[in-house]
Image (tube, rainbow, N blue to C red):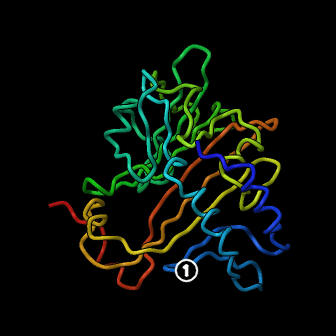
Amino acid sequence: MNARPASLALILVLAFPAAEPGWSEKPDRPLNAPGFWEKSGVRPARQMPPILAPQAFDWIMDPAQGAFTGLGPDGNRTLVVDRTPPEELFAILGRVPRLPDKAPETPTFGYVSSRPGDTTVLLARLDDCPTNGCDRLFRVELRADALGLSLADHLHPTPGLGRDAATASGLRLGMTRKEVRAILGEPRREDSHAMFYEADSKRWLTEAEQEDRAFSPGEDIVLVARTIEVAFREERAISIAVQHRLFWVNSDATKNRRRSPA
């Protein structure tokens, strides 16, 4: 579990007070640079304190935040954003038709627990592309129930999902805001309904990574973007959504497009 030590949290609070009005708290690390307060309104971006930026970034980008554990009939399987392919998702929760939403290029599959008295829901969204490697899970949303979900009637029952599901970092349904902060730190923004976290990083995609994702070889910079949203009802977490995607950011991106099927 990746909770921050209490002493470190106190040091950060004392050394780096909350950003002044007009500044957001989004950790944004350009290539070979520390971190910046995101531009807001007419204000330019401002460099974050050198201690705060990497820690804020690393808490959000920690691989454990994107690994959903406790899945499968025996509770010993895991889904990982930006890693799990469709066949593994289906092996864990069952092969089902995609939800009838309006995003054909990113199909979503919806599940609801078939265990007695358990209303847990899981929505999984994948990139749809013609070759193995790039068709992988990029968003997972774990919900306490289907209340307010427009496609609730299209969810598919599965014995591989239950209320014990959680992230490897320890995020789970039913948590308080204080418990979420202990794992993720201060949110970029927060309202009466949810806590929002974001982190971006620009870096080179290595040749091995390009091959793993079925991209054509080339030296290009990608933007690695992760968002985490925790929604609440009566001050308890009712939804945990993690999204992790890569975007090309340089002018030669076209040479690194997904490979066409042979």
Residue at (51% x, 47% y) in the render: 64
Residue tagged by mark 1?
Answer: 33
Residue at (62% x, 43% y) in the render: 240
Amino acid beneath label 1: Ala
Where residue 78 appears, as percent x and y from the top left, is 43, 37
User: Which of the pair 51/102 is nearer the observer?
Assistant: 51
Residue at (65% x, 77% y) in the render: 36
Q: Residue furthest left?
A: 262
Q: Is residue 195 left or right of residue 106?
A: right
Please identify the quadrant where the N terminus is shown.
top right
Q: Residue furthest front?
A: 7
Few, some or many C-alpha atoms within 10 Å of disc 1 (few <14, some 14-19, many ≥20)? Answer: few
Vertically, is 88 above or below 204?
above
Vertically, is 241 above or below 28?
above
Q: Secondary structure at mark 1?
A: loop
Where residue 124 appears, as percent x and y from the top left, is 48, 43
Where residue 57 appears, as percent x and y from the top left, is 60, 63
User: Which of the pair 185/224 is nearer the observer?
Assistant: 185
Vertically, is 95 above or below 125?
above
Vertically, is 205 above or below 134?
below
Please identify the quadrant where the C terminus is shown.
bottom left
Where residue 107 appears, as percent x and y from the top left, is 43, 48
Q: Residue furthest right?
A: 21
User: Which of the pair 85/169 is nearer the observer?
Assistant: 169
User: How many discs mark residues in the rendered view?
Assistant: 1
